[in-house]
Amino acid sequence: MNLRMWLRPGMAVKRWIAALLLGLVLTSLAIAMALAWLYRNYDVPAGLTNFVQTITLQFIPHPYRELIMVSVGIVFIIGGFYQLSRSLLAPFWDASSGPNQPLAEIIQAHRFGPSQPELRVVAIGGGTGLSTLLRGLKTHDIDITAVVTVGDDGGSSGRLRTEFNMPPPGDIRNCIVALADSETLMSDLFQYRFEQEGSALDGHSFGNLFITALTQVSGSFEQAVAESSRVLAVRGKVMPSSLENITVCAKMDDGREIRGESAIVEERQKISSVYLDPANPSPYDPALLSILSADLIILGPGSLYTSVLPNLLVDRLPEAIKASNAATVYVCNVATQRGETDDFEAVDHVVALEEHVGRGVVDHVLINSNLEPAQALIKPEWSVREVGLGGLEKLDDSVRVVLEDVVNPEFPLRHDPGKLARALIQLAREHRHSSSESDARYKEHTGQNGRHERYSESGQGGHGTSGPVPNPITREVRR
C-alpha cells in the first residue's frame, strides 16, 4: 500500500476514514458506558465471573490491557476497511488494470486523472537483450515504448512470416511478455512452445500463433500487437520499427553477401556491414513520434548486427533520434556474441554504429565495468568472452562513456535488469538536469524566455550537432 499516495490532499478518502473512526469511537464509548453502568448496578452471575474477567483482561495490569485492546482493534479496523473496499470495488475494476493494480492508484487516477510518468523512454532493439532491459524498466514510474526489429526469419517467426506475409511476431511477443504487469499464467501461455515432432505445430510458440491469428482477424499487424498487449496488461507500448517485409543482409569480410538474419549468424564469419532489402523501408509512424517526444532513447543491448542496426537502417529513424532532445544511450553487450561480435571490445561497437549511421546518433555509451563474474564463470567451450574496455580513448569527445556495474553476476552473458534500468534512469536524470542548466544559461545570455530547441544552423536538430548552443554533455567516465 502506497502511504504517500493515500495521504495526498484531495483524495477524498481521509475525511471519510476520520468520520468512520469518529463514529466507531463514539459507539464504543456508548457501549463502554452502558457496560460500566451495568457492572456497577448489577452483580455478575457467579458462573460468568471467570469468563468476564478473562475477556476483559483483568489478569493484565493497567495500562497494558488497554494498549492491547486498542492495538488489536486498530488492526481489525484497517484490515477490514481495506478488504471491504476491495470487495466492493472488484465488480467495477477496469478490465485493463485488473485486481493487481493497487487500490490507491485506482482512486488517485479517478480523482486526478492518470499520473504523469517521470520519463518517456524509448528502447530500440530486439531479441533477448531488449526483453532483459524491459523487465528492469517496467518496475519504474516511466512511460516505456519498445521499438522492435522485424528482420527475424528463423524458427517459428520465419515460418509464419513466409506463410502469412506478415512481420515476424517472435521479438514482439518476447517484449510483450517482458512488459506484462505480472508474468503469470498468461505470460507462460504466450511463451509456450509446441514440441511434438512431426506435427505442423512443432516449433511454434502459442504467442506467435495468437498474434498471427489476431492479424488475420483484424487485418492489421499493429492492431494484433495492441490487442495482445491489452490481454497481458503490459506496462508500456510495443511496436515494430517498420511494417514492411524486411530482409537483413550482410557483407562479410571475405566479400560474400549473406541474406537473412539466421543465415548471417550461422556463418560465424566476420561481418563487414549490414543492409536491408528493400533499402530504406518506410518507418512505422507512431515509432517516430515516440522517439521525437522521448526523454531517453536506448539502443540495445542485443545482437549488434541483427537486432540493433537493422532498426537504425529504417528510413528517417536515425534522423528522428538526432532531432530528439533525449539522451541517446547505446548499451554495450556484456559479452561477445558468436558469429557477430567475436573479439569485439566496447569501442568496436560504437565504431560499427558510426560506420552504418554516422556520428551524432549516440551521445552516451553505457559499458559494464565489472568484468570479474565473466572472467570467473565463462567457460572456454562457450567461445565467448567479456567485452573489454580497451581503446575507449579513441572515441570522440561528443560521446560520453559511462562505466557501471550492470552485469548479472550469476550469468555474466546477460545484463542484470534491475542494475541496468537504474543506471539508465540515473543517466537520463543527469542529462535532463544538465540540459535545463544549459537552457537557463542560454536564456540568460540572449534574454529569451521561450523554450529553446537544439537545432543546428542547417536545420537538422539533435544532440552532437553544431548549433548556437554547444552540447552540454562531454565525455565522462564514471566508476
Image (tube, rainbow, N blue to C red):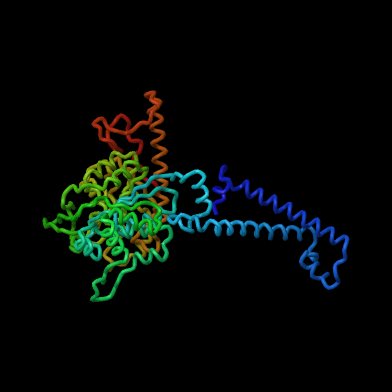
Count of labels shown? 0
What residue is shown at x 26% (from left), y 52% (from top)? 308
In depth, the one of 176 and 298 nearer the eye is 176
Question: Could you say which quadrant of the image residue 255 lies in?
Answer: bottom left
Q: Is residue 207 visible in the rendered structure shown here?
A: yes
What residue lies at 36% left-to-right and 53% top-to-bottom?
368
**Residue 336 appears in the picture as rendered:** no
Image coordinates for residue 45, horizontal then vertical, percent: 85, 70
Question: 341 or 191: which is nearer to us?
Answer: 191
Quadrant housing the N terminus? bottom right
Instruction: Name the residue furthest left.
Output: 255
Q: In the rendered image, which quarter is residue 61 located in?
A: bottom right
Examine the image and state in which quarter residue 252 appears: bottom left
Residue 322 lies, in percent from the top left, at 28, 40
Q: Residue at x 33, y 46 (%)?
A: 297
Foreground of the two, 380 or 278: 278
Which x, y percent locates residue 430? 41, 41
Front residue (pair 221, 190)? 221
Residue 194, percent from left and from top: 30, 71
Is 3 placed left or right of 273 in the picture?
right
